[in-house]
Amino acid sequence: MNPPIRYLQAWRVLRLGTRDVIDAIVAPDAPAEAFENELAAFEGAHYWVDDARTHLVLVKPIGPARREPWVRSFVLLGLTLLFTLGAGAALAGTWLPVTGPGILGALAGSLDFYVDVLRGNWGLLLQGWSFALPLVGILLVHELGHYMAARRYAIDVTPPFFLPIPPTLSPIGSLGAFIRLRTPVLDRRQLLDVGAAGPLAGFAVALAVLIWGFLTSERLPIVATGDPSYVVFNGQAIFLGESLLTMWLRDWLLPGQGAVHLSLPGFAGWVGAFVTGLNLIPLSQLDGGHVLYGLFGRKQAVIGVVTVVGLLLLAQFSPMWYIWVVLSLLVGGGRFSHPSVLVPERTLPASRRWIGWACIILFAMTFVPLPFVN
């Protein structure tokens, strides 16, 4: 159905790639029931810019539907599931990755992993299911949150793409996942909702996995500063830092003294919460950058500079933050501030601000200043 032009007082049409955007002011005498009926039948997306419901945006796809690369998406998902099964089996001690010294040795060991899989040695790998399935579930729900929010605004968006990494190179088996927006973002409301949907959705799953994980973990009489949580990967203990969330849950569900040996779902939940905090760092094209720009507009640039200074200070104690600052710079096209949306001067409706503040609170709960401790 065509847009309900007859009920609009003024409008402009913007062509954004494969989308037509109608930015309109609704006529004050528009009959409410008839107008709402036509909006419901509109073949596209629409939303109110203001809480008074006078300023309306309608988005409609144009041209033939794009053929999406779902095959590639599912192949990457399958590889990620395979590699996280291997990582989980290594964490469980049922499969030990064979690696030589250095990166070349790890790459050679990954070839042995492929050979084992092709030979059908699945029994050992399947022991890692209680790590692999929760972790992949957290990552998948996170990306589907972004994807569904983008679709709600009729933004042209790719399917989620996972980034698998062999378990000989990583105790996690994945470098995360991403989606790509193929049409520009119109205003701060769209940016905020799309940026926040992933962390909020993924966190809901990560929280449930963390509770399951701590209930199946155990405290051991191991002398270590601060009674840290740890996992054993390929015979080597990896001591993990804590966020406020993991610290609270651990002390509630596992009271007492001693280091905590995390179960497989416990480590999956820790990784899920850790990834949530990483994504919510308020830099450039990270989810946190999207949320902070949506909430505060161009003031996000100041917050970005303060964040970089803070991460560089943390890097004196945990060098991984140097890597994250460089990666954020690369992802952001050489800048830590967020690029402008098409209509940056448009204010965010008061009814949406709670989403941004919820993400700020979530960042404070899940950020791990020192991810790995000695």
Image (spheres, helix red, strand yellow):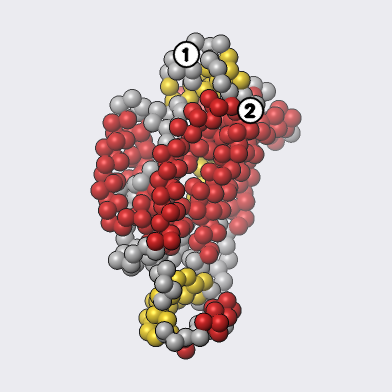
Crowding at dot 2, Cα within 10 Å, few <14 / some 14-19 / many 20+, comes out as: some
Where in the figure is residue 100, as x and y percent of width and height?
52, 21
* N-term mark: 2 or 1: 2
Identify which residue, 252 or 104, lies in the foreground.
252
- The C terminus - image quarter: top left
Amino acid type at mark 1: Ala
Q: Which mark is residue 55?
A: none
Q: Could one spot residue 133 in this view of the protein?
A: yes
Q: CA distance from mark 2 to mark 1?
A: 21 Å
Residue of label 2? 215
Label 2: which secondary element: helix
Where in the figure is residue 126, as x and y percent of width and height?
70, 32
Identify which residue, 297 or 113, lies in the foreground.
297
- The N terminus - image quarter: bottom right
Where in the figure is residue 123, as x and y percent of width and height?
74, 30
Give the answer, above or below, for where 57 lies relative to 276.
below
Label 1: which secondary element: loop
Q: Which mark is residue 224?
A: 1
Q: Which residue is painted at 60% across and 33% down in the image?
A: 211
Where in the figure is residue 214, as x and y percent of width and height?
60, 28
